[in-house]
Structure formats: structure tokens, C-alpha cells
Amino acid sequence: MTSADTEFGVFTDEGPWVLDLENLAWKTGLSRVRAELQSTLPELIRPRKLPPGARVGTTVRNLGGALGLWYLTERRRGGSEKVAGISRRLRIAAERLGPTYIKLGQIVASGDGIFPPELVAEFKWCRDRVPPEPWPVVERVLTEELGRPLSEVFGSLDHVPLAAASIAQVHAARLVDGTDVVVKVQRPSVAQRVRQDLAVMSWLAPHLVGRIPIAALANPPALVELFAETIVEELDFRLEAENMLDIAVTFADLGQRNFVVPRPHPTLVTRRMLVMERLSGFNFSDVEGMRAAGIDTDAVVRSGMIGFLEGAMMYGVFHGDLHAGNLFILPSGKIALLDFGITARLSEPKRLALLSLIVGASNGHIPSQVAALRDLGALPPNTDVDTVIAQLGLDRPPIDPTTLTADELVGELQRSIKSLLALGARMPKELMLFVKNLVFLDGAIATLAPDLDLFGEIETISLMFAEKHGERIMRQLGLQRQDDWKPDLSSMKAGFGVDESTERLTHRQLQARRAQVREKFDGRRKGSRRRARRGRTPN
């Protein structure tokens, strides 16, 4: 017998408790809570002429010191040392400044392909190096949230956490009835500190524009805005529990039964405490263990890609922070998702824009892709589609980056960035979370299924969407003919920079092509440093 709640959610077959969506006291009024939190954002991130409070001194001292030392050392050396140096110094400053800045670093760490690789690599240290709160502090928070002694709820509760992150830490526990659970506990006073730090960041960010070499399209003020949008809801664990339910229901509605979401407890959820079902499985990187257990890792990757895309395209809801620490693989081969603090929720206009973007990418229709990016907020609302296409050269045949020289590659990249900045491009929250997840899935293929045929998978997934959702997608996007949405492998091949005659491209082959491009960049950087040193050598 399976639990009754599996009829509406992708939960384990036999749960420690059965959820009734109509009788969850902690869920009452959460739509109002979300709205109120969003309404506070403008005030939290409004530009300030004067520094906001004493916290700014600590922040400026740490960040200013990092920038000053970088300016006197690595910046003068140029090349890769310039970016690596500022990345390392910013990471150290973030660790000294505490949870808010560590959380910002964790978001950057998940931004492969969005932020410079040196910055991403440095901030990955922030994921699992956060010192936990001592047990007496954790005990006090839990007692306050429960309103009664811990012994009345927990038969045992491990004092050493399973994991400690910037906002909270997670402990293994057992309820008095013998049920094994995990308990997520918010760090005390972190909510107040986050609001103080957001005020400081908003004051400081404009002064950093153009002064540090981070991604141009994620400039400091835009990054602060995106960070504020993601973190304010993380401070209320009731919202995370609701995210868990909404993702579980979405996957069930879509028939995506290859995912599992842990059940939040029916009563033990508060603003600073979240008790949930305990799951266990294979670490995402344990490929050998999975295969030894008979798990089809190709199927795992395929399920991940389809589930993520389907949830985003058809419901506008998806887990916003996929990385190896936020999921594992059950012995059944199902994907268990964890940590729903960052969950993307697209408005209906933005969901339709994302849907149009993906459909346009599948059939190679450039104008619809540019219009979709505009409607998602990546370009100003009054942007002319034809102007963007002309300025970015999107009407020209795609270039195979492996055929370009290092100088030509850099020239193309600089031209594209300059054009995007001139057009007012930026990275909105929803698009950044979507791209971050795509980058993770790209890495998942490299780990679990490196010999997967990318063209074959793209064609199969596109045909699946056409068969399952084709009529609905055409109606919602106003497409009149079936040919208006027909996967075009030739355009996809051009996007990968390969000839149309290429019939198969594995991820392993794609990585080899990327390595060629990286080698050219690295060779150019080394050449630039050698020329710079010769220029400084006295005659």
C-alpha cells in the first residue's frame, strides 16, 4: 500500500506521515507573507546617499582592504592573475563578513557560465566551509520555535550537524514516536543581519561599477537586486516547506515520477525551523556506486533534463538552485531533491516568454528568442528586436569558435559584451536561475553520461514535448501551423559550432571542443603576460 498523498505529490511510497494539503496550519496565509516580503524589497535595496549604519564600517574595511591589496599586487600583473587575485580576495572578505556575504558567494559559486570561472571556483569554497552554530544556540532557537522542551518532540537530536550553510544548519533527529527526520534550524539573528547587509550592499554596489573585473551583465547593483530577491524568502522556512509541496505537486501533475521530494512535517514547521522526512541515497558524484547498484545513469540525466524543462515551461515553477549538494540518487534510480529555499516562480507573462525562448531555440527562430529575452527582462521593454539582431550579428551564419585564432575569439567576445551593454542588457533573477540550472545539467551529463548523444537527446525531448504539450504550446504562443514549431537540428548544430553534416555529438566530444577554446584563451593570456614583462624590462 502506498501513502495516500502520493496521489498528488512525488513523495516516497511509504511515508512517515501522510500530508493533507487542506489541513496544514503552518501553510495558512503564506501568499500574504510572500507578498509582504516582496513589497519590502524596494526599500531594502534602494540607493542611499549616506552609508546605512555602523555595519558599513566593517564591510568597507573588509572589501576595501581586499580591493586595495589587489590593486597593489595582482592587478598590476594583469592576465589571469588579475581576475584570480580579486576572486580570492573577495572570497576571503566574504568569509570574514559572515552569513549574508557567504550566501552571496554561494549563489556566485553556482553561476558557471555566468560569472568568470576564477570567481566561481573561489566561491565554491563557501558551500561547505561555514562554521556551525554551537549546540546551545541551536537548542535555544528550537525551544523558542517549538514553545516547549525539546524532549517533548524529539527522542534524540544529534548535536553535530549533518551540514552547515550560511542561513541554517541541518541536524539528524528522531521524533518521540521513533520516526527518523532531519531538522533545519535557522541561525539566530541572521534575518536582521541580512537586512543590514542588503542596505550596505545597496549603498556600496554603485561605487564598484567598473572597478572590479566581474561579469559585466551581472554588475554589482544588479547582483545585489537579484540576491535580495532570492534571500528574503529563504528567511522564512514556512515558504520553503510550501515550495517543497508545490514542486512535488507540479511533478505529479506532469507525471514526472522519477523525482522524490521529502515531506515537510504536518505540524513541525515554523519561520526558523523545518522538520522533514529523512531520505538517503547515492551522492551525486558516486557514479561507480550507482552503476554497481544497477542504476541507469543515462536515464537519471534524461529524467533531470525533462523534469526541469517541463516544470519551467508548463508551470513556471522549478527548483532554483540545483547543484550536487542539493540532490542525491535513491537506490530506485529516482532523483531526490533537497533545499527548496530558492525556488523560481514565474509570472504567467514570464512563463510564456520562457516558453517562447525555448521553442525559438529548438527551431532556430532568432526573432522570437530575442523578443522572449526582452519579455523576461534581459533587455529593456522598448527594445527593437531587429536592432538587437543587427547589432549582435545574429543574422549572420554562426561561427565555429574552434576555427578562430585566440585574438579573434577575444575580439568576438569583447564585441558581443560591448553590444549587449549598449543595448541595456542585464540578467534577471528568473533567467539567471534557469541558466544556472542548465549549466548544472550540462555538468551532470559530463559526470553521469559523458557519451550521451546530445543531438539524439535534444531531438527525442523536443518530440516528446511536441506530442505531450504541442497543442497547448501552440495555442499559448499563438502559433498557427505545426511547422511553426518543428525542431530544427541544423540550427542546433550551428549553435554548437559544428557542421550540419555532423550526425552525432557526445558530451565528451563537446568538452574536447571547449578545451580547444580554453587553450586558445590561455595561450593568449600567457602571451600577453610575456609581452608585458618584456615591455617592463629595461634596455
Image (cartoon, grey):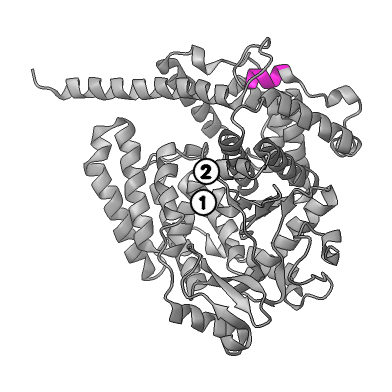
Residue 492 lies within the magenta run: yes
Say whether residue 252 is left or right of residue 83. right
User: The N terminus appears in which quarter of the rendering?
Assistant: bottom right
- Report the front residue among 427 and 159: 159
Identify the disc placed on residue 107: 1
Can residue 36 be seen here? The reply is no
CA–CA distance in space, label 1 to label 2: 7 Å
Q: Are marks 1 and 2 in contact (CB under 8 Å)?
A: yes
Going 43% across and 13% down the picture, which residue do you hit?
405
Q: Nearer the viewer, residue 368 or 361?
A: 361
Please report the bounds of the magenta region as a residue range: 490-495
Determine if the magenta segment contains residue 253.
no
User: Which disc number belongs to residue 229?
Assistant: none
- Please name whichever residue, 219 or 431, is drawn nearer the observer in this view of the structure: 431
Q: Mark 2 — residue?
A: 111
Q: Does residue 43 sit above or below 468 in this rendering?
A: below
Examine the image and state in which quarter residue 336 appears.
Answer: bottom right
Locate residue 265 relative to residue 151 in the image: left or right: right
Residue 476 at x, y = what percent?
86, 39
From where the camera sits, is residue 299 visible?
Answer: yes
Q: Position of residue 270 (x, y in %)?
A: 64, 76
Q: Amino acid at mark 2?
A: Gly
Snapshot quadrant of residue 212 = top left
Classed neighbour count for the residue bearing mark 1: other residues with Cα under 10 Å, few (<14), some (14–19), many (≥20): many
Quadrant of the drawing holding the C terminus:
top left
Q: State the image coordinates of residue 439 (x, y, percent, origin top left).
A: 58, 38
Specify the principal SS of the magenta part. Answer: helix
Q: Amino acid type of disc 1?
A: Ile
Mark 2: secondary structure: loop
- Indicate whether 392 appears above or below 132: above
Q: In x, y percent, where is residue 427?
A: 58, 42
Above or below, 46 against 358 in this view is below
